[in-house]
């Protein structure tokens, strides 16, 4: 074990460990693990993972792999384009732990900064599309189109199940849509623009790619008129940069507009992560997937932002779900909003105009050559060119100069221009085609005034898009926003099931390396070697950790991993001639994305009960597996359980499912309790997803990015997602999903090595048990294992407070803000409780600070019970307390300011919430989400 790095990742000193073990009455770490982890799953052998090395050696190793690849000029397009990331955004947002280590903004009071920027993102999208409601980002363009299809089907209450592709959709996205539609029994039909008669009363929606997959910009008036006549929804998949030069799609008749915001300052990154967008008409607002940031007020009447519609685990409609989207792309959405703010409307329009003018100049040059023919005269940035010579030879000539162009077929090439093209690169492209560029003066440029006519005087007229155009102002705006928020650089985020551990600086550094950030996902294999070498390492290491035979890195979130795993199981059964297997057993304690994913995979959910200790009721499981034996497809189960304990009968559970012909999907959300100690495949699991944004150190980014690769046993390998965009199963738009953040996980594993990884797991279990032991006397720990111990997280029961003095779990969570903490996970999986996960990265001093805070809150509750504090006017009901309120001459709370601030406990670490408690009812007055509990569907 390389103690040099391991000691930096793990927050506990050797002395801390001794003290904590003594508090538990346990002599050693080995004894702790023996008492916590069931003996029949303990893995005693050493994993085939190299010995850990220090960060400098790890960085040098990784850099040497990527150094083999030359930088390229990517002109492939297909939804991915080079762009410039402004230095002020890169430095103060992408590289800032204050932005990338924060959690999803479910707790509004401590998330006002990123909520404001996400609100800016939504504003930008509504301005571009002309539609009134946008969400706070989706995973990528392909999955955004798939989500739009779900909205369309749901808007027709499932009575229409046909979707028409009107023009040439990007091939990789077409494959993704085929995968999604096949599994939801939706008919996906390719139609020509002229075939308007196929738009009939059985059609739920038409999809139009704008510009189309070959760059054509065309008006679709007749198609849209026919759609409107038949009450068919119009979905436009639009290039967000092209939208700057045209009238908004809403004016054409679009009901839903989706696309990618990658061109707004987000590096190519070999395919991701990038923020997608979706905007809908007013009548579809309640059906929009994902998160919407809305404006509300706090209890003092001040404006405040909050998530108005949420699809988090406990909010998803589970079996009734039409989406399993959980992770969004908040960090990337915030970057794209910042890009628009930095440039403002005039410079944005100039960028789009510049891209078009480069394409137009090259098109005019092509038209003067007898060797080529321009296929489309209407385009934005992409030219489809017919060539007399072999397209393959032309492509090879380009690659010899490190220029990447797209070969459409034997005699057609497409070239896509972007923001980074200049005179030098334009001349290089002309050299490849052996043509002479027309003079710039001869190029009939699209004028700024013409662009402005399309957009109108009111385009992006909001003050935020006009105020921060010098770097001092922009730097201060980003700092102003981030100071409102709570992230890991401020203190512990003890969210159960979320594993908010250290995201080390050395792990983050490679993300912005040029050869990591600027590679096109469809670049030829020879340019992918640095990535391929790294991914092969990760495949080997993660297979060793889990016991599986193969990993797919395509799923770009945990929920997408669940979906991919279930599709693999479903297709395996089909290959065995067992099409009827469509029942998925899911314990009542499961993550909400589990039944949602099963629903979208086309499976029928049967709920399995849990016992009083939070374990799966094996008797009920057996009965239901037997009852549905002929139709049993899978069991979805989380291990350790969602209740924070190691169930001792996990092997037996897997055997029961296999006995009745099913496969076992194991949710890897709690893998941080297993790495180096036990392996999923050895327990009997057939497939699982691994949250790299939890266990393996990719940061949460304020609500995304995430990565959820799946591992499978041997017989499921043929059913993994394909990295070819022309055939096979497709889950995400890019072959390796969010490839550019995989170096974070590579660095984490390479620096820790096997011994470090195992020790990290042990320390996570120790910290959780120490916290549970100390908190049990304050708020009872709800579930414990057979030896009175827990796994890596625990649930504390605060429901008695609600019964005795009307103190809710929300009150406790908001009061924790005053004490300088992000609240634990609230009311999930048990209503009225808090689920706590400290991780291995937190120092004992921080754990003790949390224990003291909870103790003081309990004392405040006792004072309410004793009548010292009013039941309706006390430090908990009024929490969080803002600096403005505490300093106000109108301060009128019946307790001292020192109590309100909890300053005696927080001291120099005092965090001030920028707003007091946000009014959720006010915020949801016009936007609401119907999310009945799982019990309703039993």
Image: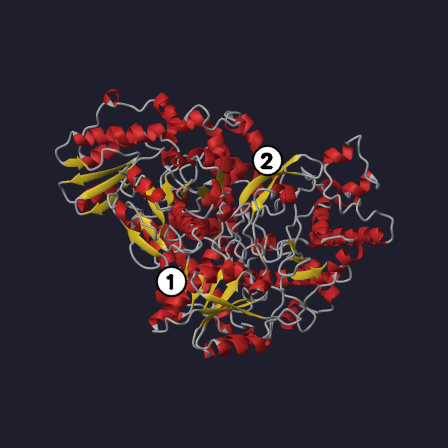
Disc 2 target residue: 481
- Which comes sooner in the sequence, label 1 or label 2? 2
Which of the 4 image quarters holds residue 592? bottom right
Which of the 4 image quarters holds residue 796? bottom right
Residue 322 to residue 35: above or below:
above
The percent position of residue 911, horizontal first and vertical second, equals 69, 41
Please tell me the numbered disc located at residue 330.
Answer: none
> Of residues 458 and 480, which is closer to you in this image?
458
Disc 1 target residue: 720
Residue positioned 37% across, 40% down in the render: 238
The reply to whether residue 836 is in sight is yes
> Of residues 656 and 721, which is closer to you in this image?
656
**Pointer 2: residues within 10 angstroms few (<14), some, or many (20+)?**
some
The percent position of residue 442, horizontal first and vertical second, equals 23, 21
The reply to whether residue 241 is in sight is no
> Of residues 766 and 881, which is closer to you in this image?
881
The percent position of residue 847, horizontal first and vertical second, equals 70, 54
> Of residues 355 and 44, which is closer to you in this image?
355
Q: Are marks 1 and 2 in contact (CB under 8 Å)?
A: no
Q: CA distance from mark 1 to mark 2?
A: 41 Å
Judged from the image, the secondary structure of the residue bearing numbered disc 1 is loop
The percent position of residue 695, horizontal first and vertical second, equals 54, 57
Residue 762 to residue 458: above or below:
below
**Pointer 1: residues within 10 angstroms few (<14), some, or many (20+)?**
many
Quadrant showing the N terminus: bottom right
Judged from the image, the secondary structure of the residue bearing numbered disc 2 is helix
Residue 259 to residue 833: above or below:
above
């Amino acid at each position: 074990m390389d103690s040099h790095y391991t000691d930096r990742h793990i927050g506990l000193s050797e002395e801390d460990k001794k003290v904590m073990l003594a508090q538990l009455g346990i002599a050693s770490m080995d004894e702790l693990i023996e008492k916590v982890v069931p003996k029949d799953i303990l893995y005693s052998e050493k994993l085939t993972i190299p010995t850990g090395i220090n960060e400098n050696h790890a960085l040098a190793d990784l850099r040497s792999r990527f150094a083999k690849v030359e930088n390229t000029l990517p002109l492939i397009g297909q939804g991915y384009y080079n762009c410039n990331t402004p230095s002020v955004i890169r430095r103060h947002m992408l590289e800032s732990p204050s932005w990338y280590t924060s959690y999803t903004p479910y707790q509004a009071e401590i998330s006002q900064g990123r909520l404001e920027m996400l609100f800016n993102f939504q504003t930008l999208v509504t301005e571009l599309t002309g539609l009134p409601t946008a969400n706070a980002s989706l995973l990528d363009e392909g999955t955004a189109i798939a989500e739009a299809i779900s909205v369309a089907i749901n808007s027709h209450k499932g009575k229409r199940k046909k979707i028409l592709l009107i023009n040439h959709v990007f091939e990789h996205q077409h494959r993704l849509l085929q995968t999604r539609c096949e599994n939801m029994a939706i008919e996906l039909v390719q139609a020509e623009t002229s075939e308007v008669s196929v738009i009939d009363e059985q059609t739920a929606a038409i999809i139009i790619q704008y510009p189309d997959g070959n760059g054509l910009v065309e008006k679709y008036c007749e198609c849209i008129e026919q759609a409107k006549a038949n009450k068919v929804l119009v979905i436009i998949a639009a290039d967000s940069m092209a939208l700057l030069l045209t009238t908004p799609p809403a004016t054409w008749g679009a009901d839903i507009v989706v696309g990618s915001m990658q061109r707004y300052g987000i590096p190519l990154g070999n395919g991701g992560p990038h923020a997608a967008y979706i905007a809908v008409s007013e009548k579809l607002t309640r059906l929009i997937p994902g998160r919407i940031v809305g404006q509300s007020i706090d209890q003092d009447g001040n404006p405040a932002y909050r998530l108005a519609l949420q699809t988090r685990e406990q909010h998803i409609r589970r079996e009734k779900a039409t989406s399993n989207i959980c992770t969004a792309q908040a960090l990337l959405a915030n970057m794209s909003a910042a890009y628009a703010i930095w440039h403002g409307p005039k410079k944005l329009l100039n960028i789009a105009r510049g891209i078009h003018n480069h394409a137009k100049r090259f098109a005019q040059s092509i038209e003067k050559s007898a060797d080529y023919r321009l296929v489309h005269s209407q385009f934005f940035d992409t030219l489809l060119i017919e060539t007399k010579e072999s397209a393959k030879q032309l492509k090879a000539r380009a690659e010899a100069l490190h220029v990447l162009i797209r070969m459409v077929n034997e005699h057609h090439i497409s070239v896509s221009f972007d923001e980074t093209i200049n005179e030098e690169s334009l001349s290089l492209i002309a050299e490849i085609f052996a043509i002479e560029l027309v003079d710039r003066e001869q190029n009939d440029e699209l004028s700024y005034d013409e662009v402005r006519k399309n957009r109108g005087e009111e385009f992006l007229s909001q003050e935020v898009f006009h105020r921060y155009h010098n770097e001092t102002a922009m730097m201060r705006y980003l700092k102003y926003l981030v100071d409102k928020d709570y992230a890991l650089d401020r203190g512990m985020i003890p969210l159960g099931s979320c594993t908010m551990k250290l995201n080390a600086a050395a792990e983050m550094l490679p993300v912005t390396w040029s050869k990591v950030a600027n590679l096109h996902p469809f670049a030829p294999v020879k340019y992918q070697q640095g990535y391929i070498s790294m991914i092969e390492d990760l495949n080997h290491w993660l297979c060793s950790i889990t016991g599986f035979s193969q990993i797919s890195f395509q799923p770009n979130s945990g929920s997408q991993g669940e979906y991919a795993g279930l599709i693999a199981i479903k297709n395996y059964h089909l290959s065995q001639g067992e099409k009827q297997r469509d029942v998925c057993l899911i314990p009542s304690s499961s993550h909400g994305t589990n039944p949602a994913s099963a629903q979208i995979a086309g499976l029928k959910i049967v709920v399995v009960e849990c016992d009083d200790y939070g374990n799966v009721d094996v008797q009920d499981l057996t009965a239901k597996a037997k009852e549905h034996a002929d139709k049993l497809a899978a069991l979805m189960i989380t291990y350790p359980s969602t209740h924070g304990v190691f169930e001792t009968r996990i092997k037996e559970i897997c055997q029961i499912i296999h006995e009745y012909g099913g496969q076992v999907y194991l949710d890897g959300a709690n893998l941080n309790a297993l790495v180096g100690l036990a392996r999923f495949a050895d327990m009997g699991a057939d497939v699982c997803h691994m949250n790299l944004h939890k266990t393996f150190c990719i940061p949460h980014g304020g609500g995304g990015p995430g990565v959820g690769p799946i591992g499978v046993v041997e017989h499921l390998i043929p059913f993994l997602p394909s990295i070819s965009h022309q055939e096979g199963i497709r889950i995400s738009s890019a072959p390796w999903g969010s490839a550019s953040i995989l170096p974070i996980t590579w660095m984490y594993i390479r620096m820790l090595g096997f011994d470090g990884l195992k020790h990290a797991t042990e320390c996570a279990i120790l910290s959780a048990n120490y916290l549970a032991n100390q908190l049990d006397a304050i708020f009872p720990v709800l579930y414990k294992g057979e030896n009175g111990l827990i796994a890596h997280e625990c649930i504390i029961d605060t429901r008695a407070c609600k019964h005795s003095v009307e103190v809710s779990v929300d009150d406790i969570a908001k009061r924790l803000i005053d004490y300088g903490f992000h609240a634990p996970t609230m009311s999930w999986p048990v209503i009225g409780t808090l689920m706590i996960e400290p991780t291995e990265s937190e120092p004992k001093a921080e754990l003790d600070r949390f224990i003291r805070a909870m103790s003081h809150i309990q004392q405040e509750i006792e004072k309410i019970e004793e009548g010292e504090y009013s039941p309706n006017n006390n430090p908990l009901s009024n929490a969080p307390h803002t600096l403005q309120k505490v300093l106000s001459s109108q301060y009128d709370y019946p307790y001292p300011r020192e109590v309100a601030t909890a300053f005696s406990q927080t001291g120099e670490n005092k965090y001030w919430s920028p707003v007091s408690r946000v009014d959720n009812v006010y915020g949801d007055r016009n936007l609401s989400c119907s999310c009945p509990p799982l019990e309703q569907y039993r």
